[in-house]
């Protein structure tokens, strides 16, 4: 009935979709198995992609020929570049999406791929022979063979939904939980845990009074997420901002005794950085209000997502409290907020390529690894799909270093440090964030997948080549051109910058903090005429490189030092036990995690610099 597939992907959320595409684009024959084909690429929580650090991840996925950015561009209702008041390392793109268009686009793109087949049914177990995974078993007893399997089960593994004192089995509102896989993996020796996440109520937008809220429009000159998308967004939907109050908080507190969070019914680990509204009130008792973002779910629906009001309180408490928020006085609710508990597997049980240490050719990606967020899940799916293909073709793993990408930071953190709460990406986690900006993801990463043998990226490679050449040309022009004091001094004074005393190179002027290429071109006709030949994205990236040249140089020096440790490979069978000069904690952690390189070993919690020195001596360095 079924052929033997190269890769079976279990689950069709953000991780599963990217895993299927990545393996298929490398040439693998893929089966995407999901409990419901109607919910492929579903945005289970907020209808948005990107945000602080997350936007960088989406751009990196795109540069690696993943589809999340293209799908986002096809369904965007509003685009904003966040953190523009800060340095460019912090700039983060975010797009509000049409939820139904997002999922529909994902399915259409997957179905258009000749290497991807589909099967709708619960996968209840994996097939393991001789220490390797060689297929899956479904709930009705079908066995489907494969050379490798990627599990991307999201919140469905023994999922349990909480609304006040009510509990419902399910992986998402209206969908049943997945059973069988956790139990089998435990029998195979895997350690599992429980995590929780939540979602806010959905509201009928026709019942809201937007005049009582602050409007939040999109950018005047919106960008695209994908480096390959042509054209610009011509119309956008506004979001709105409103606030809770002490009156709202008092209403919410009436239900605290029935909250599963506070009465102990939920034992899972929750996201510290995306707390429920009841958790905010409890943890930040000194604050008399909290911000709520009123976000549209799409072009052709009145459904509203209340970002910031995630809750598992009883329905009547949610309703009464939300009705006291400005603009929500006459609101009608589509469905209440809820919390969900689910199984996850601590990611220290994975190799750096996301393959499990206990079972060959079995890969985990997404929330099964303890992460939260569409973007975090999608990038893991992409990396797992690529590495599943490479593993079955007996090729080395594809590993991104921390200096290569935010994706590299995420995977490195998970595998070496694990996580005791749902892991979310932040710019602060990336120590080389000036090097790995959102604007240069294509330059950094597209050549890497080309070297892997990724198919169908000729146009993408050409765009990268064109961008590189354009940036060289722009930098050369700015470095060669000179400007005289009488041409610029009046303008510099208006900009609050000190006047020139003599003729200088244009590069020196542009390196000033308050001087930008797009501003100065207005008073330099020759520069303006030259820049007319180039895209704004290429101009802006060149300017960032010029302004932050010193910082970039320092980060590259740090990367070179770290790469020396990354080049020192540790054998899989390295015995740390006899090395008594190592601390006992270091021996335990090194034995458990089995780092691939000395650089990876240096980032394991509990392994100190002195332990690394001992290892250097032991391996003869």
Image (cartoon, rainbow, N blue to C red):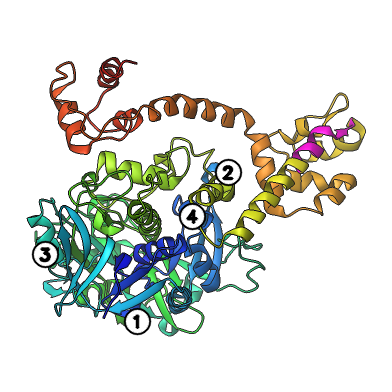
| Mark 2 closeness class: few <14, some 14–19, many ≥20 residues within 10 Å | some
Q: Earlier in the sequence, mark 1 or mark 4?
A: 1
Residue in front for this viewpoint, 518 or 380: 380
Which type of secondary structure does the marked residue at label 3 adopt? helix
Magenta segment's dominant SS is helix
Tell me the CA gap for discs 2 and 1. Answer: 39 Å
| Mark 1 closeness class: few <14, some 14–19, many ≥20 residues within 10 Å | few
Residue at point 21%, 76% (across, down)? 315
Q: Report the magenta residues as a range.
A: 474-484
Q: Name the image quarter holding residue 128.
A: bottom left
Residue at the farthest right position: 486
Q: Is residue 263 above or below residue 595?
A: below
Residue 94 placement (x, y as % from top left): 50, 60
Query: Which residue has dot 3 on it?
Result: 257
Residue 266 visible? The answer is no
Q: Earlier in the sequence, mark 3 or mark 2?
A: 2
* Numbered tag placed on residue 88 in the rendering: 2
Residue 11 visible? The answer is yes
Tell me the CA gap for discs 3 and 4. Answer: 38 Å
Query: Which residue has dot 4 on it?
Result: 55
Q: Earlier in the sequence, mark 2 or mark 1?
A: 1
Which type of secondary structure does the marked residue at label 2 adopt? helix
Residue 247 placement (x, y as % from top left): 29, 66
């Amino acid at each position: 009935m079924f052929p033997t597939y190269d890769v079976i992907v279990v689950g069709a959320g953000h991780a599963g979709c990217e895993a299927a595409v990545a393996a298929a684009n490398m040439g693998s024959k893929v089966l995407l198995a999901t409990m419901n084909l109607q919910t492929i690429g579903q945005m289970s929580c907020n209808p948005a992609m990107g945000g602080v650090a997350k936007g960088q991840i989406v751009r990196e996925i795109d540069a690696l020929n993943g589809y999340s950015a293209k799908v986002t561009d096809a369904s965007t209702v509003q685009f904003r570049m966040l953190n523009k008041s800060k340095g460019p390392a912090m700039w983060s793109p975010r797009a509000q999406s049409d939820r139904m268009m997002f999922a529909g686009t994902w399915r259409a793109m997957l179905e258009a791929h000749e290497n991807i087949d589909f099967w709708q049914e619960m996968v209840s177990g994996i097939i393991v022979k001789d220490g390797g995974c060689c297929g899956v078993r479904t709930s009705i007893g079908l066995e489907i063979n494969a050379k490798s399997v990627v599990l991307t089960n999201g919140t469905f593994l023994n999922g349990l939904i909480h609304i006040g004192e009510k509990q419902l089995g399910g992986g998402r509102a209206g969908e049943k939980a997945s059973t069988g896989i956790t139990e089998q993996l435990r029998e195979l020796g895997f350690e599992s845990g429980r995590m929780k996440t939540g979602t806010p109520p959905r509201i009928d937008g026709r019942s809201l009074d937007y005049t009582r809220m602050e409007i939040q429009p999109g950018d005047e000159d919106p960008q695209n997420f994908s480096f390959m998308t042509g054209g610009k967004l011509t119309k956008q939907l506004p979001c709105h901002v409103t606030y809770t109050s002490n009156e709202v908080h008092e209403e919410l507190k009436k239900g605290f005794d029935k909250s599963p969070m506070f009465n102990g019914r939920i034992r899972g680990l929750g996201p510290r950085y995306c707390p429920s509204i009841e958790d905010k009130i409890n943890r930040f008792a000194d604050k008399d209000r909290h911000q709520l973002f009123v976000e549209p779910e799409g072009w052709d629906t009145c459904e509203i997502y209340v970002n910031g009001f995630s809750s598992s309180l009883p329905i009547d408490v949610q309703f009464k409290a939300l009705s006291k928020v400005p603009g929500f006085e006459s609101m009608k609710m589509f469905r209440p907020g809820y919390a969900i508990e689910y199984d996850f597997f601590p990611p220290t049980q994975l190799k750096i390529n996301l393959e499990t240490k206990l079972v060959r050719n079995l890969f985990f990606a997404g929330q099964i690894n303890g992460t939260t967020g569409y973007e975090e899940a999608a990038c893991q799916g992409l990396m797992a799909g690529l590495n599943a293909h490479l593993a079955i073709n007996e090729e080395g793993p594809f590993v991104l270093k921390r200096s290569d990408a935010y994706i590299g930071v995420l995977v490195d953190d998970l595998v070496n440090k694990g996580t005791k709460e749902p892991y979310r990406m932040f710019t602060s986690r990336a120590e080389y964030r000036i090097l790995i900006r959102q604007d240069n993801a294509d330059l950094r990463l597209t050549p890497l997948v080309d070297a892997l043998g990724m198919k169908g990226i000729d146009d993408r490679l050409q765009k990268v080549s064109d961008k590189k050449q354009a940036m060289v040309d722009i930098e050369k022009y700015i470095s060669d051109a000179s400007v005289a004091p009488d041409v610029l001094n009046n303008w510099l004074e208006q900009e609050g910058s000190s006047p020139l005393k003599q003729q200088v190179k244009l590069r020196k002027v542009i390196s000033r903090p308050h001087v930008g290429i797009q501003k100065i071109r207005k008073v330099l006709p020759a520069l303006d005429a030259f820049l007319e030949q180039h895209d704004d994205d290429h101009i802006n990236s060149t300017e960032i490189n010029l302004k932050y040249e010193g910082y970039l140089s320092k980060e590259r020096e740090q990367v070179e030092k770290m790469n020396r440790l990354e080049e020192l490979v540790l054998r899989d069978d390295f015995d740390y036990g006899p090395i008594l000069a190592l601390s006992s904690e270091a021996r335990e952690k090194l034995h458990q995690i089995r780092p691939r390189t000395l650089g990876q070993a240096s980032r394991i919690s509990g392994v100190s610099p002195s332990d690394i020195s001992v290892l250097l001596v032991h391996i003869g360095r």
